[in-house]
Image (cartoon, rainbow, N blue to C red):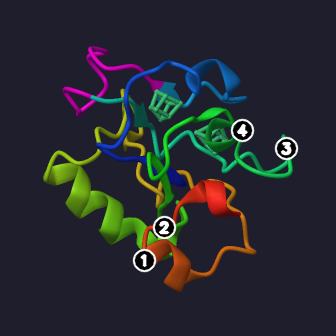
Amino acid sequence: MAVRITDECISCEACASECPVAAILEEGNEKNPNEDFFYVKPESCVECVDHADSPRCAEACPTEGAIVWDMPYTEEFNEYYALRNEEGIYKIREHKKKGLMLPIVKSQKFNESISIAQRQEAQFVQEF
Ligand code: SF4
Ligand code: SF4
């Protein structure tokens, strides 16, 4: 990833239109594993690298704690995403030929100034 939307989200819709890579899905979307709140597709999110100085979704979000840092979407964290996909926390896209678009198939850009510790602690993106 990425960033992750938590159950603090109030589904106000402010974030989705701000995303430069259309990575945010509203509740009710069949590709969103969450029933009651918005969702960031980790296989699509680029943490706004090369698009903005900081994540646009978090800048638009009025709700503290609704958007937190997640792990980089890189090979190193392939297992992390594979396991959580099995658990239903994520709903990673299945490509007809390539299969599940896990980091090992296609990694994504991430903000290198955010440490792994900050990501493990799910720190609020708005604070950066
Ligand atoms: S961090 Fe940027 S690319 Fe990722 S979901 Fe938010 S707006 Fe989209
Ligand atoms: S802007 Fe924040 S509260 Fe609103 S839908 Fe997006 S994550 Fe949820």
Which residue is nearer to you in this view: 40 or 67?
A: 67
* Magenta: main secondary structure: loop
Task: Name the disc covering residue 25, or none.
Answer: none
Q: Nearer the viewer, mark 3 or mark 2?
A: 3
Q: Which residue is mark 4?
A: 56
Q: Is residue 72 left or right of residue 109?
A: left
Which residue is nearer to you in this view: 109 or 106?
A: 109
Q: In the rendered view of the protein, which quadrant contains the C terminus?
A: bottom right
Q: CA distance from mark 3 to mark 2?
A: 19 Å
Amino acid type, mark 3: Ala
Amino acid type, mark 1: Gln
Q: Which residue is mark 3?
A: 52
- Circles 4 and 3, Cβ within 8 Å, touching? The answer is yes
Q: Residue at x 55, y 31 (%)?
A: 23
Q: Nearer the viewer, mark 1 or mark 2?
A: 1
Q: CA distance from mark 4 to mark 2?
A: 18 Å
Q: Is residue 40 left or right of residue 127?
A: left
**Position in image of residue 3 (x %, y %):** 52, 52
Q: Earlier in the sequence, mark 1 or mark 2?
A: 2
Q: CA distance from mark 4 to mark 1?
A: 21 Å
Q: Which residue is mark 2?
A: 71
- Circles 4 and 1, Cβ within 8 Å, touching? The answer is no
Picture layout, residue 115 above or below residue 2: below
Q: Residue at x 28, y 59 (%)?
A: 82
Q: Which residues are magenta?
A: 25-36
Total count of labels: 4
**Position in image of residue 75 (x %, y %):** 50, 69
Q: Earlier in the sequence, mark 1 or mark 3?
A: 3
Q: Which residue is mark 1?
A: 120
Asked whether mark 3 lies closer than 8 Å to ligand 1, one says: yes
Q: Is residue 70 magenta?
A: no
- Circles 3 and 2, Cβ within 8 Å, touching? The answer is no
